[in-house]
Amino acid sequence: MGFPQCRPVTAPIGTIASSEKNLAEYPPAPNHKSMNPANLFKHDTDTTNLAPGEVLFTQGEPGDCMYVLLEGSADIIVNQEVVERSTSGSLLGEMALIDNSPRAATVIAAEPCRLAKVDERRFNFIIQNNPFFAKHVMTVLVNRVRQMSQLRGTPTESLPDLMP
């Protein structure tokens, strides 16, 4: 079974041109750079809440979900060193969710936090239905890999050799 045949567009030339003019009336489409994932989950009622100093997860432990920070801020700690202060919209634990590896960092609430939990089933649904979210996750992953390679002293140019 093949793909259905596409029919040629038979609209009058003026129709297509006038449609293009009308595009200026619409707001620009969002992109992954302007996306704040907290907006996708802001209406979640079943959230994880942390008090300052409370640990979300610990480096080295298994992980089967990621979190989106909806409110508050949290410290990302790698080998007992704070490497990032995450704020609203930050993704936490995405590496372990994607490749089933142990947690690459410890996350501790710096102030009261509210987080949306995203398990594999929910993650797959969202990336299939929102390409901007998928691109945002990829961008976060690339930035985290680069940051971790800098911490380890690994030149970024050699990263493709590290990937399977």
Image: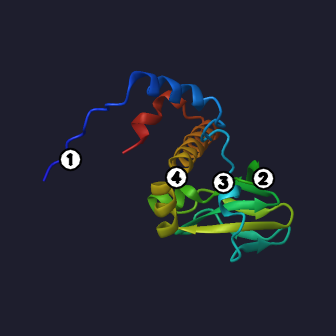
Q: Residue at x 77, y 56 (%)?
A: 75
Q: Name the N-terminal-most of marks 1 and 2.
A: 1
Foreground residue among 20 and 126 = 20
Q: Position of residue 138 (x, y in %)?
A: 52, 45
Label 4 sits on what residue type? Answer: Asn
Judged from the image, the secondary structure of the residue bearing numbered disc 1 is loop
What residue is pinned by disc 3? 37
Q: Are marks 2 and 3 in contact (CB under 8 Å)?
A: no
Question: Is residue 80 visible in the rendered structure shown here?
Answer: no
Q: Residue at x 53, y 44 (%)?
A: 135
Q: Residue at x 20, y 47 (%)?
A: 4
CA separation in Å, label 1 and label 2 = 47 Å
Q: Nearer the viewer, mark 4 or mark 1?
A: 1
Judged from the image, the secondary structure of the residue bearing numbered disc 3 is loop
Q: Name the N-terminal-most of marks 4 and 3.
A: 3
Q: Nearer the viewer, mark 4 or mark 3?
A: 4
Label 3 sits on what residue type? Answer: Pro
What residue is pinned by disc 2? 87
Q: Are marks 3 and 1 in contact (CB under 8 Å)?
A: no
Q: Is residue 56 left or right of residue 132?
A: right
Foreground residue among 161 and 123 = 123
CA separation in Å, label 4 and label 1 = 25 Å
What residue is pinned by disc 4? 130
**Neighbours of disc 4 within 10 Å: few (<14), some (14-19), many (20+):** few
Based on the displayed image, in which of its 4 quarters is residue 50 positioned? bottom right
Foreground residue among 21 and 122 = 21
What residue is pinned by disc 1? 4
Label 1 sits on what residue type? Answer: Pro
Q: Nearer the viewer, mark 3 or mark 1?
A: 1
